[in-house]
Image (cartoon, grey):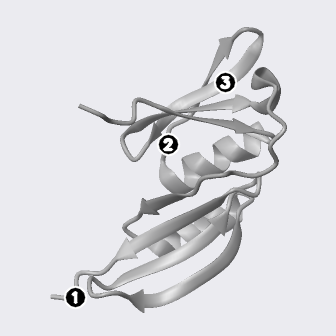
């Protein structure tokens, strides 16, 4: 069976990124040492997540080339936590679609885009 075994994200600003993802998405990122670098591991939506400093992988990318859309129970609470932990509000929609979803685009402390989706029960 195909599944995502782990997501690894190389970051520039590791401490603000850890604070942001722990506060907004409850990732539970905790430090561990590997090859002389401090990395952080936790989970994002049930998927193992690792943050590694860009320098550990020799990566020079400044922003993501992928985007996560993450379902949250309360978009307003997620926005508040994001703004309090170095995130930026990029754009938000009203309730859209047949299922009644609200979509909010955020940037994390490294400038990566993340879309949070709050689905309303319209029945």
- Residue 46 image-quadrant placement: top left
Residue designated by label 2: 27
Q: Residues within 10 Å of mark 3 (few under 14, many from 20)?
A: some
- Please report the residue visible at 22 percent of the width from the left and 88 percent of the height from the top: 122
- Residue 13 image-quadrant placement: top right
Q: Which of the labelled discs sits on residue 39, or is there none?
A: 3
Q: Is residue 25 left or right of residue 55?
A: left
The foreground one among 52 and 77 is 52
Q: Is residue 122 left or right of residue 115?
A: left
Q: Is residue 32 above or below residue 117?
A: above
How far, Cα to Cα, is label 3 from label 2?
14 Å
Determine whether the residue tagged by mark 1 lies in a helix, strand or loop. Answer: loop
Determine whether the residue tagged by mark 2 lies in a helix, strand or loop. Answer: loop
**Marks 1 and 2, the one that precedes in the sequence:** 2
Mark 3 touching mark 1, by CB under 8 A? no
- The N terminus appears in which quarter of the rendering? top left
Q: How many marks?
A: 3
**Picture coordinates of residue 9, whole percent (x, y):** 63, 37
Q: Is residue 67 left or right of residue 17?
A: left
- Please report the residue visible at 48 percent of the width from the left and 48 percent of the height from the top: 26
Q: Residues within 10 Å of mark 2 (few under 14, many from 20)?
A: many
Q: Is residue 42 above or below residue 121?
A: above
**Picture coordinates of residue 79, whole percent (x, y):** 58, 71
Q: Residues within 10 Å of mark 1 (few under 14, many from 20)?
A: few
Determine whether the residue tagged by mark 3 lies in a helix, strand or loop. Answer: strand
Residue designated by label 1: 122
How far, Cα to Cα, is label 1 from label 2?
29 Å
């Amino acid at each position: 069976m195909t599944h995502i075994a782990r997501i690894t994200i190389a970051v520039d600003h590791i401490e603000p990124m850890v604070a942001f993802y722990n506060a907004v998405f409850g990732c539970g990122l905790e430090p561990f040492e590997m090859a002389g670098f401090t990395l952080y591991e936790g989970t994002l939506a049930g998927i193992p997540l690792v943050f590694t400093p860009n320098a550990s992988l020799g990566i020079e990318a400044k922003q993501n080339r992928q985007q996560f859309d993450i379902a949250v129970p309360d978009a307003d609470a997620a926005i508040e936590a994001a703004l309090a932990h170095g995130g930026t509000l990029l754009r938000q929609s009203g309730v859209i679609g047949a299922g009644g979803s609200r979509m909010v685009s955020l940037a994390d402390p490294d400038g990566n885009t993340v879309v949070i989706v709050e689905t309303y029960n319209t029945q």
